[in-house]
């Protein structure tokens, strides 16, 4: 119980809180499961697969297959650019703050994807989700006092395990808390994938709107608790 109280006792902005991070991780896992099950076995949250496959197909001189993987990579890069642009201009040009703008763009993108029928190419979906994931990962990068990721889990798993090692070998209380926080994000990502997979299988392509509801919950949490 002492650890549990310490984990959620945070002196940080709501955007860096564990609760907000868990919501974003739920969305991240949901989107990966949705695109894999409902949109032709694609992953759009991370671009490592697209980069590798582009190189593999180029090496095999299968140029059409290689070129297919370029649009989501460009979309991801555009998302990074857009996130930085929003952060640097929102206070000057918009009535909303940058975090609200980013979340609203994500919400709109998710709604649009839900309307794209399954009998068309999955390229538009991969472009939109890659852009959306890039916005999220570029905008929300801090978990209380540590860097983290809400759209993929490799880095979080490494950081969680490293913190657990320090907690065990050095009897470091803060490392133990940090490790549990990371594992909560990982569990949330897995839970999002589970929910996304089940709902996509049951109700089809409109299931992505549930991810939109989760994201809307994150926006409400932010607006209620922002300082």
Image: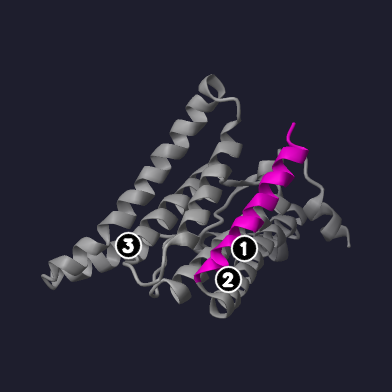
Left or right: where does residue 52 sit relative to residue 192? left
- Quadrant where the C terminus sits is top right
Name the residue located 60 percent from the left edge and 56 percent from the top edge: 212
Q: What element carries label 2?
A: helix
**Residue placed under numbered mark 2 in the picture:** 196
Disc 2 from disc 1: Cα separation: 8 Å
Residue 101 x %, y %? 56, 37
Numbered circle sitting on residue 99: none
Dot 3 falls on a residue whose secondary structure is helix
Residue under numbered circle 3? 123
Whole-angstrom CA distance, mark 3 to mark 2, is 20 Å
Looking at the picture, tell me which residue is in the foreground, 16 or 225.
Answer: 225
Q: Which-is-in-front pick, marks 2 and 1? A: 1
Outermost residue, right side: 1
Estimate the x, y position of residue 181 in percent, counting from the top left.
Answer: 70, 58
Vertical side of 137 occupied by 1: above or below: below
Q: Could you tell me which residue is drawn at 10 percent across and 70 percent down?
A: 61
Query: Could you tell whether 78 is left or right of 45 in the image?
Result: left
Q: Earlier in the sequence, mark 3 or mark 1?
A: 3
> Mark 2 or 1 closer to N-term?
2
Q: Give the range drawn in magenta.
A: 205-227
Do the CB atoms of the residues marked 2 and 1 lie less than 8 Å apart?
yes
Label 1 belongs to which residue? 210
> In the image shown, does 90 or 147 lie closer to the viewer?
90
Badge 2, how many Cα within 10 Å: few under 14, some, many 20+? Answer: many
Circle 1: is it few (<14), some (14-19), or many (20+) Cα within 10 Å? some
**Based on the displayed image, in which of its 4 quarters is residue 223 positioned?**
top right
Q: How crowded is mark 3: few (under 14 residues within 10 Å), some or many (20 or more)?
A: some
**Residue at the extreme top:** 92
């Amino acid at each position: 119980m002492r650890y549990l109280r310490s984990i959620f006792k945070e002196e940080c902005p709501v955007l860096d809180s564990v609760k907000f991070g868990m919501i974003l991780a739920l969305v991240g896992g949901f989107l990966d499961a949705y695109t894999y099950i409902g949109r032709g076995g694609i992953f759009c949250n991370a671009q490592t697969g697209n980069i590798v496959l582009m190189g593999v197909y180029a090496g095999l001189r299968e140029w059409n297959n290689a070129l297919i993987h370029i649009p989501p990579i460009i979309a991801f890069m555009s998302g990074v650019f857009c996130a930085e642009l929003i952060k640097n201009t929102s206070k000057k040009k918009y009535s909303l703050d940058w975090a609200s703008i980013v979340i609203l763009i994500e919400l709109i993108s998710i709604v649009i994807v839900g309307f794209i029928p399954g009998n068309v190419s999955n390229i538009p979906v991969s472009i939109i989700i890659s852009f959306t994931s890039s916005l999220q990962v570029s905008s929300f990068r801090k978990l209380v006092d540590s860097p983290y990721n809400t759209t993929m889990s490799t880095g979080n798993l490494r950081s969680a395990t490293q913190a657990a090692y320090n907690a065990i070998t050095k009897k470091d209380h803060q490392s133990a808390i940090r490790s549990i926080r990371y594992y909560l994000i990982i569990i949330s990502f897995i839970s999002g994938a589970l929910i996304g997979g089940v709902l996509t299988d049951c109700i089809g392509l409109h299931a992505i709107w549930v991810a939109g509801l989760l994201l809307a919950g994150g926006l409400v949490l932010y607006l209620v608790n922002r300082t």
